[in-house]
Amino acid sequence: RMGTNLRIDAVMGDAEAAQLNGLIELIDFQSSSYLMGFFHVLYNVRKRIRHLPECVRATVYCGILDMHYTLS
């Protein structure tokens, strides 16, 4: 135990009602935001960055994946 309370500002998930229902039960999640599904994030970002160079697109995708799979 680290000695600090868990603080959840936002959660990104897929369109699974079970995920959201499970999070709603957590007291620490009560004031947090549930972001749109991960697939929808990638889909909408892809539409908006098509015109950018490949290296920039890769950086954007890596940032999204890092955020999605972060442990803290």
Image: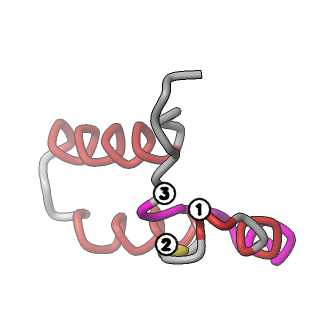
Mark 1–mark 2 CB contact (< 8 Å): yes
Tag 1: residue type?
Asp
Q: CA distance from mark 1 to mark 2?
A: 8 Å
Give the residue drawn at x 59%, y 62%.
28
User: Around disc 3, counting alpha carbons within 10 Å, would you say few (fewer than 14), some (14 to 19), or many (20 or more)?
Assistant: few
* 39 vs 7: above or below: below
Q: Badge 2 is on which residue? A: 32
* Identity, as a three-letter code, of the amino acid under mark 2: Ser
Q: Is residue 67 above or below residue 2?
A: below
What's the distance in space between the residues labelled 3 and 2, CA to CA?
Answer: 6 Å
The answer to if 35 sits in the magenta stretch is no
Choose the circle earlier in sequence order: 3 or 2: 3
Q: How many marks?
A: 3
- Mark identifier at residue 15: none
Q: Residue at x 46, y 53 (%)?
A: 7
Q: Is residue 51 left or right of residue 24?
A: left
Q: Which element carries disc 3, helix, strand or loop?
A: loop
Q: To which quarter of the image does residue 51 belong?
A: bottom left
Q: Are marks 3 and 2 in contact (CB under 8 Å)?
A: yes
**Place of residue 6 in the rendered image (x, y in percent of width and height, measured from the top left):** 52, 46
Which residues lie in the magenta part? 9-20
Task: Assign the N terminus to one quadrant of the image.
Answer: top right
Give the secondary structure at mark 2: loop
Question: Residue beneath label 3, please?
Answer: 8
| Identity, as a three-letter code, of the amino acid under mark 3 | Ile
Q: Residue 52: percent from the left, percent from the top?
A: 13, 56
As helix, strand or loop, the secondary structure at mark 1 comes to helix
Q: How is the image coloured?
A: secondary structure
The correct choice, above or below, for 4 with respect to 61 in the image is above
- The residue where tag 1 is placed is 28
Kindly check if marks 1 and 3 are in contact, taking CB atoms under 8 A apart as contact. Answer: yes
Front-lying residue, 47 or 24: 24
